[in-house]
Image (cartoon, coloured by chain):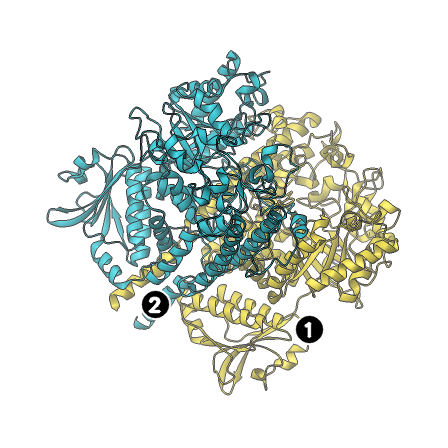
Chain colours: A cyan, B yellow
Amino acid sequence: MKKICSLLLIIAVSFQLKAETGYDLWLRYQPLQNQTVLTTYRQQISGITLGGNAETMKIIGEELQHGLSAMLQKKITVTNKSSSTASLIAATGISPLLAGTEVKKLLAQTGEEGFIILSQNINGQKRIIISGNTDKAVLYGAFHFLRLIQTEQAIHNLQVVSVPKVKLRMLNHWDNMNRTVERGYAGFSLWNWHTLPGYIDPRYIDYARANASIGINGTVLTNVNANATILTKNYLEKVKALADAFRPYGIKVYLTARFSAPIEIGGLKTADPLDEKVRQWWKDKVKEIYQYVPDFGGFVVKANSEGQPGPQDYKRSHTDGANMLAEAVAPFNGIIMWRAFVYSAEKNVDRHKQAYDEFVPLDGSFNKNVMVQVKNGAIDFMPREPFHPLFGAMPKTPLMMEFQVTQEYLGQATNLVYLGPLFKECLEADTYTNGKGSTVAKVLDGSFNKAQTLTGITGVANIGNDINWCGHPFAQANWYAMGRLAWDHSLSAERIAEEWLRMTYSNHPAFLQTASKLMMESRETYVQYSNPIGLHHIMGTGHHYGPAPWVSNLNRPDWNPVYYHKADSIGIGFNRTATGSNALEQYHPEARKIWENMNTCEEKNLLWFHHVPWTFKMKSGRNLWDELCFNYYTGAEKVKTMQQAWAGLEPYVDKQRHDQVRMLLNVQYDEAIWWRNACLLYFQTFSKKPIPANYPQPDKTLEYYKSLRFPLAPGN
Amino acid sequence: MKKICSLLLIIAVSFQLKAETGYDLWLRYQPLQNQTVLTTYRQQISGITLGGNAETMKIIGEELQHGLSAMLQKKITVTNKSSSTASLIAATGISPLLAGTEVKKLLAQTGEEGFIILSQNINGQKRIIISGNTDKAVLYGAFHFLRLIQTEQAIHNLQVVSVPKVKLRMLNHWDNMNRTVERGYAGFSLWNWHTLPGYIDPRYIDYARANASIGINGTVLTNVNANATILTKNYLEKVKALADAFRPYGIKVYLTARFSAPIEIGGLKTADPLDEKVRQWWKDKVKEIYQYVPDFGGFVVKANSEGQPGPQDYKRSHTDGANMLAEAVAPFNGIIMWRAFVYSAEKNVDRHKQAYDEFVPLDGSFNKNVMVQVKNGAIDFMPREPFHPLFGAMPKTPLMMEFQVTQEYLGQATNLVYLGPLFKECLEADTYTNGKGSTVAKVLDGSFNKAQTLTGITGVANIGNDINWCGHPFAQANWYAMGRLAWDHSLSAERIAEEWLRMTYSNHPAFLQTASKLMMESRETYVQYSNPIGLHHIMGTGHHYGPAPWVSNLNRPDWNPVYYHKADSIGIGFNRTATGSNALEQYHPEARKIWENMNTCEEKNLLWFHHVPWTFKMKSGRNLWDELCFNYYTGAEKVKTMQQAWAGLEPYVDKQRHDQVRMLLNVQYDEAIWWRNACLLYFQTFSKKPIPANYPQPDKTLEYYKSLRFPLAPGN
């Protein structure tokens, strides 16, 4: 026995060092390494008593049992018996298991989805109670408890009460029905429509588990550039199969509605939202959908934007379109998320202003079950972007935040860029609408409108069928951060990064210190070597991969990088003050105050709002051109620092994942140099100034960079 | 210690029962369950002595160490020290480690790739020697040894000498550069061209390992419907990265050559193979390729087939085209595989005859480094197809077998169909060219031509980026079988199935008995419910998914199912005798003898060669129509038997993979009913006979089946 035992020890260790594919995400449940913590947990956790055996409750039992057994290297039993003295109780508040505890009182505050985790003495025995008002809430609590163990937190006196700050916490999949993904960098769509409904890929379940573990409760399966085929009977059967798979994990399914579907699959001659036949068609279609999916969430709609059909095709308003659909889904408690990302090539107006111009006049005109879904900024998911002026400007309309988790403009699948700081920068931005402290987060969570019943944050998913789900191993952190912030926007980006690192890699302090810094600085580094000082939208055409600030020949003026940087012999940047496009007037006077003046504007947003002379003196004492050079060179060099930092983390990471990130950081460095050289060589044709001699000069010409073509770049 | 030990035991067990994704293929290296066998192995295997430290030798050491440690639950050490007394020695024949052994003598027979595994007493100690003349040969031996352990074979007296029967053992990937896969049912292409060359996906390495483990030594990365872009500098750098990754595993990289590349990427006005500029362009291009990939294997070419460009566009012959390319690659020892899959819509000749008509006159005209690559049958990878008449008919030309591993016509990713019996049926078919026993396998392996230096078998890959590589868990067996048969075509399909089952699932006798039967009967079952009695090419248009025998409106006559089944009021089937297309004349008189006569023809090929009256009396005593009904109904019912058999195997398979196969068998049953009903209802419009009353009558109409559309079916 002793001999076998030592052999097993070796195997246990070798399992742990084994290459990981990343498939397990942050739910790896590896044996805990800290022996002190492990010993304590082993004493504290004996078994689980479950208050029920509905499907979600069974999932809770399995997840706790599997996770705790693996992490504690101890067999954890699960029982439904009320006589059990297992140390862990997972049950809803009405369970007899919790009679006589403080649970009921606490649950008065937690609503439908919030949970509590409570250390209690019951009959003289120390117990940990995970509870909520619904099974789904208990599921969230169970994942939270597992997270405490995964991150090695103390559990001897738990008093956790956690309630999500917004109600709709969602993913938008820009997945086409042929499984290509618009702006997807992690392979192809998870949804294998061909083998649905008969075949439920185990990934669908793991997808639901991962989402439930961070509180995501809705998923939009299809691209906003929608295909009406998804609304046909054949495909609704497939949608139903996914909805059935996701339901026990508390995840509702939503679809995108192609506005012209009544014509394309309904055989009507029009999709006019005021046409009675059209209205009836949608009502019938929605009724049909609910027959397949009784808790169907509703529709996301991209209308009259970038060539998509919409109510304006019939001289109707966004309100007409949204309310027609809202009426159809209302009897079933469905909602409509109507996207505000609209701009028109025909209008000679700064694109920055168009969504505000179109939507603010409509405030108050939407039905109660309509949300307007607004991107974090007014242009398009740029590496850095001031908050969208619509936030705070539509007090009578619930606004849904649309973040982009997929890194379309932020290094796609090859750059390590942690988006936590970007999300937080926007959530904490002050709209001043109701005075100082009127953050975007408060606009979203209904703080300013007690009557507001719909609140939400959504993220454009970065998930594909790559084994590790997100392509870049660190891109998983952006999915994680989106979910965690949707649950609680007050969490810091640092805290989320550390949680994710602990669960995904290691609890070792030396690892955490370095890796956390690496993540926290990564987005600023990306901005610095790609779009510093407020530059934006200067990437390659179509695929948006790499720099192409010189492009000026695209059909619509505002598709061209030159429209955005406006470099000339005098200077560079987009004048959005009163002497320019005056986009700034859309912000509250307090919010725009520091931006209006070139001398007070934060330098990170300077070229976003101002056309600034090359000779303009920056806070560093350098002129603008030299500051631009400084940023591009410093940013690229920081990638070297990232490479070095990662190299030092080799002892803490399995070889496979360490190699992956190492290779990708090499690619990232090459791309950083490419951004730096291409942009500086191009802008130099305007500034006519030299790149300071202390920097290594570009070894390729501007013509070389202009000649690069990427016909097969993904995600287009 | 004792307490920890028992905990570890539990963990060890729970690891083993853990859900498996299928990613590990047949290289799972799970702890052995048979305690007797395990104890013996533990005594027999102490450690490994490696004869060298080149890259391939290191891989051998790692694979043996990892595999044996995991299976034997024992730390296996690896050393290079000649003084080691480790029980296992892996070294090439020239290694001093093997001085004084019988190895040298045996290696005289094994060539460059063959290996030996030999039990020997060295200095009174029992040792196992794995050897060959090259590191690559030792790698094959190492994987063979691991297979012995995985399948629990006795190793106390090993005398294995194994030499591959053909030299080129390859996969053809029909992967497009945008990562779609023509006839791919397991997701999208493994090759992520965008992140190459900087990022070497760990899958590339596991792909190489898996191939090396079954002896595959070449891979054609790109689709035969070729894109010239792969030959541009930017992409050759990416090809080089893959070639570098595969090289240590003994795998050479090949590409497909688009015949018009000199025009498309070379800027020439013609691709005429007799034009000097064109010839020079190819020579220069090939030279460039070899600068990137010094051991580049060569090109596969699909020319003048299904719209692809080729020499006939310039009134030149296949020989002119092939020899031009052969000349370009010859200085670098490259080869050309010129595909014989050609047919012309313009010719009013049974498509069955066209490849023979075009190629037999060219026998002897090709350069020495050209192979003609021939599909197993004359039509196109049908569920059952007589062997291609070209086999045996081009004695002066090396023929390469092209099997289809991806199940284009055999249930795609949703049907469990083991192709071992199909491959064997063709390999063992008798061409009679050099008298009785002149099997297709002997034509391939050079048995009839001692001067033949090129021999090969290739398979159109069924590999995609699905986690389990092949979509259907059992589709992995077809990849495995293709490789094993390419190494040794004399292996039986049963033996290969059992090997694969043992490695992929379990060595339990009860499991093996049932699962092996399930596999062995699966292809015949598929034939029975889809294309019985020699029917062929009656599947859906374009995507080839499901039945559509009624289709008659496609551009080319021979794209239409009605061209192949020729059902009419008299009967059904394609008359290929002297009174019909006379395709039979292309076979050796002995080979075609039994086929020529409706009364002697094996019933499995009856409708392939004959137009048979509905009233024709079959061996069963039933008339043809009733026999057709019998087959369709029996085939569909057999899927039920498969479902039941699989259900009984639940104790032996982890839940995840068991569920996957269970769900897919449900889908398969539905598809079998669909084939049965659609085909019988349609053919009934000609036979005017009832479906025998003892069968459940179709519950849907022919019009219903005709109305089904699959616009998004994969693989098209």
Most extreme residue toward the top is A276
Q: Which residue is pictured at 35% across the width and 50% down the height?
A: A494
Circle 1 is placed at which residue position?
A: B111
Disc 1 and disc 2: Cα gap in Å?
Answer: 43 Å
* B679 in relation to A1, above or below: above
Residues A550 and B8: in front is A550
- Is residue B501 in view from this perspective? no
In the displayed structure, does residue B678 sit left or right of residue B72? right
Residues A352 and B647: in front is A352
Circle 2 is placed at which residue position?
A: A9
Residue A630 picture location, percent across and down:
51, 54
Which quadrant holds residue A437? top left
* A658 in relation to A527, above or below: below
Q: Amino acid at mark 2?
A: Leu
Residue A376 picture location, percent across and down:
44, 36
- Is residue A24 in view from this perspective? yes
Q: Which residue is pictured at 79% across the width and 62% down the height?
A: B369
> What is the crowding at mark 1: few (fewer than 14 residues within 10 Å), some, or many (at least 20)?
some
> What is the crowding at mark 2: few (fewer than 14 residues within 10 Å), some, or many (at least 20)?
some
The image quadrant where one finds the C terminus of chain B is top right
Residue at disc 2, secondary structure: helix
* B658 in relation to B509, above or below: above
Residue B248 picture location, percent across and down:
60, 67
Residue A616 picture location, percent across and down:
51, 46
Q: Amino acid at mark 1?
A: Gly
